[in-house]
Image: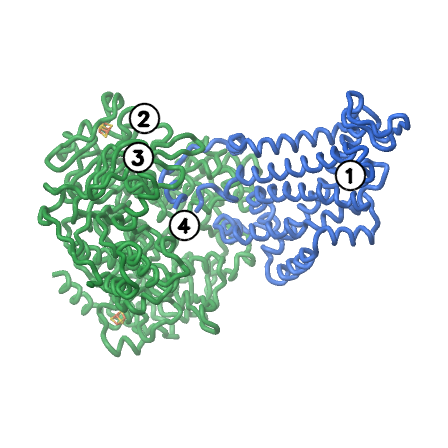
Chain colours: A green, B blue
Amino acid sequence: MAAVPGHVTTPGRMGGPGQLVAPTFKTERLSVVYLTEQGPLRAVRGVSLSVAAGETMGVVGESGSGKTTLALGAIGYLPANGRVESGTSRLAGVDLAGRPRRELRHVWGSKVGLVSQNPQAALNPTLTIGRQMDEMGRRHLSLGRRAAREASLAMLERVAMPDPQAVASRYPHQLSGGMLQRCALAMALLTHPAVLILDEPTTGLDVTSQATILDLLDDLKAQFHTAILYITHNLGVVARVCDRIAVMYAGEISEEATAPDLFAQPLHPYTANLLRCVPRLGGQGTQERLATIPGSLPQMGDLPSGCVFAPRCPLAVEDCRAARPPLVEANAGRKTACLRWQILRSEEGRQTALQLDLRAAAPLTLSAVPRAPAGPPRVRDGSSSPPGTLVAMPQDLLTVEDAAKECPGPRPRSTVKAVDGTTLSVGAQQTFGLVGESGSGKTTLARIVAGLTRPTRGHVHLEGTPLGPSVSGRDPSVLRRLQMVFQSPETSLNPRQTAGQAVMRPLVLLAGLERREAGQRARELLEAVRLPASYFDRYPGELSGGEKQRVAIARAFAAGPDLVICDEPVSSLDVSVQGALMNLIGDLQDGAGTSYLFISHDLAAVQHLSHFIGVMYLGALMEMGDAARVLASPYHPYTEALLSAVPVPDPTSRDHRMRLRGSPPSSAETPSGCRFHPRCPRFQGDLCRDQAPPWRLSDGGVIARDAATPATADAAAAAAEHAICCHIPLHDLAALQEAGRR
Amino acid sequence: MKGKVEADHGRLVSPRRAAVYWRRLRLQPVALAGTFIFFLFLVIALLGPLIAPYDYAAQDATQRLQSPSLGHWMGTDNFGRDVFSRVLVGARDVFYLGGIGTLLAAVVGTSLGLLAGYVGRLWDEAIMRVLDVLLAFPALLLAMVLLATAGPSDLNLILVIAVLYIPMFARIARSMVLDLRTREFIEAARLRGEKRSYILFREMLPNALPPLLVEASIRFAYSIFLVASLGFLGLGVPPPNPDWGRQVNEARTFFDAAPWMLLFPAAAISLLVIGTSLMADGLRHVFGPPVARGSR
Ligand code: SF4
Ligand code: SF4
């Protein structure tokens, strides 16, 4: 018996996206309701959607748009408090709505493949990957033990697993996120499902892993003739993988179109604005304001009676508020739920729909905030030249010299070099952007600067004054000058303290204000981060993610710091909110003259805010310099790979694809020679494997990476402009990259 | 899975916390009943001697072993004392001993747990090992040994209850600290240079309160039972105070002639223990997940 069921070839395969093919998966006026403490919550209302075999349908929306609920509701896979209120959903001719869970379970097993954002949670941690896949094959395909294993291995092979045998015998925790997601894909495809639901499958991954998964999806789409429902918030990703796209807003579809149409000419104000919000690499120059959508998602319990977007829509008229606009056919193959979509067809019309006021709303003044007293006179001990390679400028606000952090590794007596000798400096009123993927050590470096992690080696100076290795040893006057904004809005505020209390505390403690005065200043600060005064008494549970992050920013700025460390402050927020926060962060710098150490995995975000950029890989800087020069050729090969991995929100873009070999490394074993060599697309053989590459400076100079001698002043100046740590000389790199682009 | 989908809703209006708690409690009739029973007994404990129809200690040789009647709702005992009055007044000691004991255990245990969790290392080891030893003994046995050594008195009873329950509170507080200490708001506090005591009692403790309150109500239920058991064994409140446990013990000899002597105090014990447990169980749901709602 054939181990793997052969391809199912359906007629109409050549039908192309959404044309004349009976849809495999179809929902009609589907409504899903959650029964919550606050009463019933209609998370999805009357959504009709269809996906044909071989077609990839993208469902994009911000958090709260109901996109996941739509997908799960359509297959009846809802949490206990959710149910399909009305509407139908059919999968391969089978009606799913209203079926008991017991029957559905069989349908899920054999006809639905589901890959969720977190493969860790979807896989059983106590069974090997192989066992779990075999189980699927035996239960849903009625295969024997042998045949099941063969099918599993064949499928792992098809998702481009390098060594299927080895992977099959591993447990989930032994694999990296990207690998796990591939296993989850293999498992979902094992039964040759009629529909494959991908719910943010790459959201938890680094860009380079995401890029390989998306490449893989391209291949699989051609091989398997399934209908794919791709749910994501990332417009770049949908542009990259989807044939058709439905944009969801507040539980309804606002627009549906083919991918090229949608990006070329959105016919709904929400889409038009959303597209504007995405920070684009290279496009706009650095330091420009980002577009945002004012207002926030309507609350599900209290929806506007007419168009759900009306409160935020610049085109809204009386009619919009009267009745809910239906999803109408605009052109062939595209639908919009906007009454005034015609306006958007012309360029001028589109401009009126883009309400985005790109100027600062009002100049931000933080005069109310007491500034820290001028620092102590800058002392520079002439003999202590940095042992690192690049020069820490004494006139800079913050200097980090040869910082390193080793932690005990997974195996006994092994060490992990989270940060491995990094030197950098941040000038006054400047932003230093630190980019890197997970495991690059960027967060550890930030924590060393903050004093939350004690370095094994190296020093941190603030205006030439050495800082203690741990916060507990630092003087209050120093603490006041150095604050931090954390990544997760969920945990960065104490759930039992109001926004006002959170902002007042540093004012009382560090700025030494009286309570009453502190209260007054706290109100001013909340206003400065553009929160209404009424938020003073709100608890974090009553704020949205973006609002919480604003409070956290106000708290960091309360005592008038000189340097604020921002550790991925916008990463967990929606694009439309991200822009507003990044604008705020920029405005605060202009108003208060603060410096930032801005850490992110998002190159576009870093580009927008930074004057200088450092690219980190496995605990060390690979490239650094002026923001514009780092993001222009010549790049370090790693920077180049990072840039080419970012999906561009433009389906027509022919990205030149440069992918990294192998899987993301662990810092447990730092590779010899150039630490990037096992994955480097421009690997130069033994030289790279055996010798640490030098820093190559923009003026053509070269500094050995571990040189103990201080660099000359000229070299220092050149290094401050642009430096790349690679064996390939800069002009050769530039030539290679030029050739690659053609 | 559930959390994920709920997170997809975006922001829900969340009214004031107290209102939320009340609404959640109202949705649980059983817990509501338990809470009612608890507060009923609390009122009785506070007002006991005032609302009791007779003096709990007044003996009346003419009224011995009367069965329940309009005059004596729960009958009388072998000395002619009114059982109803004795049950009412007995509640006071239960709340007094169990309540103060539990409270003491909560304060000391929580402090130890916070300290052990936050300071860590040697302190953690030392504190938790000592508490583990305490936990290793069966509670009643330990209480009997301690009381037999120290002699039964109100103060000793309270101390014994406290010693027995300190480990439970310490464990909960400690695990809360371990969970909270890596949260970013704690790191923000450290970056401000907050003192350790501020971080422990002002930043962490409020977040640890809900599980501690649940634990306190569970422990209180247990302590009622413990006080009654000790009273039954003759190690409880010294006479003449009416003690439910001792009443049950004394009633055993007269069970055939006067079952009400035993039934009513026993019922009071059971009712209060069950009511308090139901309340504790309800509180667990009322407070929901220990820290912020909406955090994963
Ligand atoms: S229907 Fe009206 S309010 Fe809604 S998106 Fe269109 S123009 Fe705006
Ligand atoms: S030194 Fe070699 S391996 Fe390292 S980045 Fe340059 S080319 Fe690649």
Q: Nearer the viewer, residue B5 or A309?
A: B5
Image coordinates for residue A158, horizontal then vertical, percent: 22, 62
Binning the other alpha carbons within 10 Å of mark 4 as few (below 14), some (14 to 19) or many (20 upward) gives many
Q: Kindly report the distance in space between the C-alpha atoms of the residues bearing marks 4 and 3.
A: 30 Å
Question: Residue A658: which quarter of the image?
Answer: bottom left
Sequence order check, earlier mark of 4 and 3:
3
Subunit that carries the residue with mark 4: A
Three-letter amino acid code at the position of disc 1: Val
The kind of secondary structure element at disc 3 is: strand
Q: For ligand 2, tell me if the residue under mark 4 lies within 8 Å.
A: no
| Left/right of residue B26 with respect to residue B55 in the rendered view | left
- The residue beneath circle 2 is A304
Q: Nearer the viewer, residue A192 or A617?
A: A192
Q: Kindly report the distance in space between the C-alpha atoms of the residues bearing marks 1 and 4.
A: 61 Å
Q: Write down which quadrant ligand 1 falls in.
A: top left
Image coordinates for residue A369, horizontal then vertical, percent: 47, 41
- The residue beneath circle 4 is A487
Q: Kindly report the distance in space between the C-alpha atoms of the residues bearing marks 3 and 2.
A: 15 Å
- The residue beneath circle 1 is B248
The kind of secondary structure element at disc 1 is: helix
Subunit that carries the residue with mark 3: A
Sequence order check, earlier mark of 3 and 2:
3
Subunit that carries the residue with mark 1: B
- The residue beneath circle 3 is A44
Three-letter amino acid code at the position of disc 2: Pro
Nearer mark to the viewer, of 4 and 3 = 3
Question: Residue A278: which quarter of the image?
Answer: top left
Q: Nearer the viewer, residue A289 or B40?
A: B40
Mark 4 vs mark 3: same chain? yes
